[in-house]
Amino acid sequence: MVQGVASPSTEGGEAFAWVEINGRSLDVLARRTPPTLRGFFGDYRPSASQVIGVGDALQITVWEAAAGGLFSAGPESGAVSPGSRSAAIPEQTVGRDGSVTVPYAGRIQVAGRTQQQVEAAIVERLRGKAIEPQALVNVTHNVSNTVTVTGEVANGARVPLSLRGDKVLDVIASAGGYRSPVHETFISITRGNRTARAPLQALLANPSENIYVRAGDILTVESRPQTFTVAGATGANGAVIPFDARGITLEEAIGKAGGLADSRADPDGLFVMRYEPTSLVREFPNVSPNLLQHQNIPVAYHLNMKDPSALFAARRFAIRDKDIIYVSNSPLAEIGKVVSLVQTLSQPAVQGVMVSRIVH
């Protein structure tokens, strides 16, 4: 049974929730949903056709079925087949009004349309002016259908998206790949006014997390070393210890901290302290309603190392970034400190008596 005990603060309120590390609390923690890109954004394959946007550069070529038409003369015209003529219109950038200019057709709205739709619009404008016109539109510089990649990558860039669709790791590879160690690398995607973050190892371990990106996404690769702090009666008191992996268990963390100090540690005084979301803490019984009014609640997880089963529980308990592991001193160690202090203070008096006896 999980025991949830609220610790009173000096102001009479509850300072934190106390939770025993046992089978039930471990089951509650196992249900905690890790950060996920797919769960936040979904994984919807982009449309097979991209639309043209402001800032894109277009190359337009117009054909006529016979000589003697609008596009027959000029240095840019050329024969494609007997009797037909073509003309390449100089490359244009789509203006802020979303339009480009086509000779004899005027300003044509292209933003928000596919290449095929723009080709049809040009032909319609030239119908009756040119001889059986045909048009071909190519996007030579894709600006609107790009993803911005920044952060810990070899070459931050605006990466154009392909028609087949591109996933997170595809665009990171196009930007030269990530530079930080895998276990320290996190991926953030900003889409509109929403941002989600997940560890890179989650994408590598679960391919479904490697979701499709969309035009306009901002993808940031961050280096965030994961650490935990150790305090109290351990071999590394006061140390900040890196994970060196995506995640470690409490058992491994105790080993990294040099274990419990045999002469000082209280085996019943091992705690892991962190902030937990209210939705998770609600699943622990006997937590004060006053604590549940907060968005994030400080929790002290307690493990009694005198119980042999505690080692198995420690193997299941996952340490998270910025956790604090504290091991209290045993009562005998405190008594030993008092005895040592008394002995230190009594040394001058004892030495004085011995000198006095020698003199007399």
Image: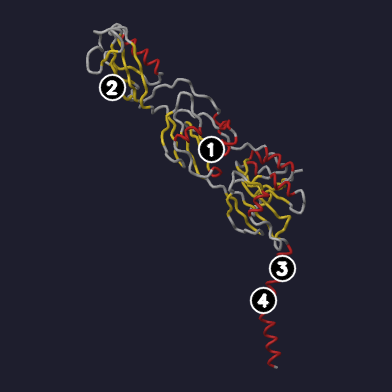
Q: Which residue is mark 2?
A: 90
| Mark 2 vs mark 1, CA separation in Å | 43 Å
Of residues 132 and 282, which is closer to you in this image?
132
According to the picture, the residue beneath numbered tag 3 turns out to be 336
Q: Looking at the rendered structure, which numbered label has been put on residue 197?
A: 1
- Going from the N terminus, do you reach mark 3 or mark 4 first? 3
Q: Nearer the viewer, mark 4 or mark 2?
A: 2
Give residue 68's position: percent from left, percent from top: 24, 8
Residue 277, given in percent of the width and then of the height, sits at 62, 41
Instruction: Give the amino acid at mark 4.
Output: Leu
The local crowd at label 3, few if under 14, some if 14 to 19, many if 20 or more residues have their Cα within 10 Å, is: some
Q: Is residue 165 visible?
A: yes
Q: Amino acid at mark 3?
A: Gly
Lower position in the chain sequence, tag 1 or tag 4: 1
Pair 3/1: label in front = 1
Q: Mark 2 falls on what kind of element?
A: strand
Number of dots carrying numbers: 4
Give residue 239's quadrant in the image.
bottom right
Q: Secondary structure at mark 3?
A: helix
Where is mark 4, residue-wise?
345
